[in-house]
Image: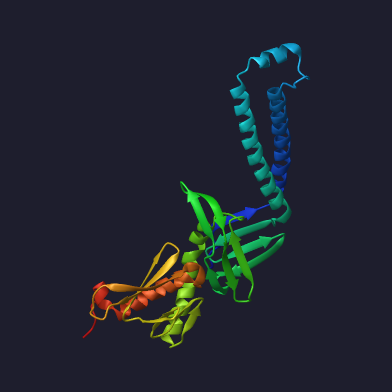
Amino acid sequence: MSQSPRLIYQAQTERTPHRRRAIFLTFAILAVSGAFYLLQQIRSGDADFLEADQADALADVNPLLLDGGVVVAVIVLAALFIRFILNIRAALTLKNERVRVFDQGFTWERDGILARYSWTKVKRYREGARVIAVFGRPLIKTGAHRLTMSDGREFRFSGRLGDPRQFDHAIAPIIADITGSRMGAALFDGRSMKLGKIAITPAGVIAGKHKLSWRSVDITRRGDKVHFQRASKDGGAFQPVTTVSVRKIDNVAGFLDVAESVIQNHQPHRFNIRTKK
């Protein structure tokens, strides 16, 4: 009896909320613009539209307060205008999109068109999104993670749809198991695989112009870089050879899993693994 798919993560975006915000911001801009105009008239002494007692009361106001009010109005107006532009742009260009990630696959709905795939249909996953966070909250989101399927279709998860970090956290372990198994099978059969800017072979790894043997290589990921090192000939410390961005490596999580396993098999002394004599 098959189990029902378990929902792991979901994200969606719609145009309608951005339209509503744009309308609200329009009224806010008009209100702040009116306040700015009023302050300017009072500063210049041209507030003829005020009653006499109101004008007398304002005449006693410290000019510095009026100047400060004008500065605040300008700042608020600029912030509102920027948000208005962003929401108008989203309302005009954003697609109604919904992504649901399950343990057995995912669904991706875009403007009413639904696509369903199992994870076994994933050919390539490339981490391409960047997130700059402040106190853990995403502030700037650029780029997109890309899923390429066996039929050639591509899905892009960008910051417009949600937090790319959460999306990657949900799918990376699943895809690593599947793609890592494919890589392991290829190496077992004596085949090589190209993974973007690097390649794996039964003999080792090719990173850029460097050919590194499984018997002497060390591979680690730090942040968004994969570091390749080679053992020195005298058996000393590993020496840096090159680094490759994860954005240029296909199925990087699966590659790292396979690399760790193969390196342990070829360098058992590093991991205190006993071998048969």
Q: Which of the two residues, 88 or 253, is positioned nearer the viewer here?
A: 88
Tag count in the figure? 0
Quarter-of-image position of residue 32: top right
Residue at the right extreme?
49
Residue depicted at x 44% and y 73%: 255
Residue depicted at x 23% and y 75%: 236
Quarter-of-image position of residue 128: bottom right
Residue at the left extreme?
277
The colour style of the image is rainbow
Quarter-of-image position of residue 120: bottom right
Residue depicted at x 51% and y 56%: 131
x and y percent of residue 221 in the render?
Answer: 40, 66
Q: Is residue 165 visible?
A: yes
Indicate whether 8 appears above or below 210: above
Residue depicted at x 42% and y 62%: 223
x and y percent of residue 237 in the render?
Answer: 26, 72
x and y percent of residue 16 in the render?
Answer: 71, 48
Indicate whether 46 appears above or below 146: above
Left or right, residue 5 beside residue 201:
right
Q: Is residue 15 visible?
A: no
Residue at the bottom extreme?
190
Residue at the front extreme?
44
Q: Which of the two residues, 40 or 142, is positioned nearer the viewer here?
A: 40
**If the image is split into quadrants, where does the C terminus sit?**
bottom left
x and y percent of residue 82 in the render?
Answer: 65, 45
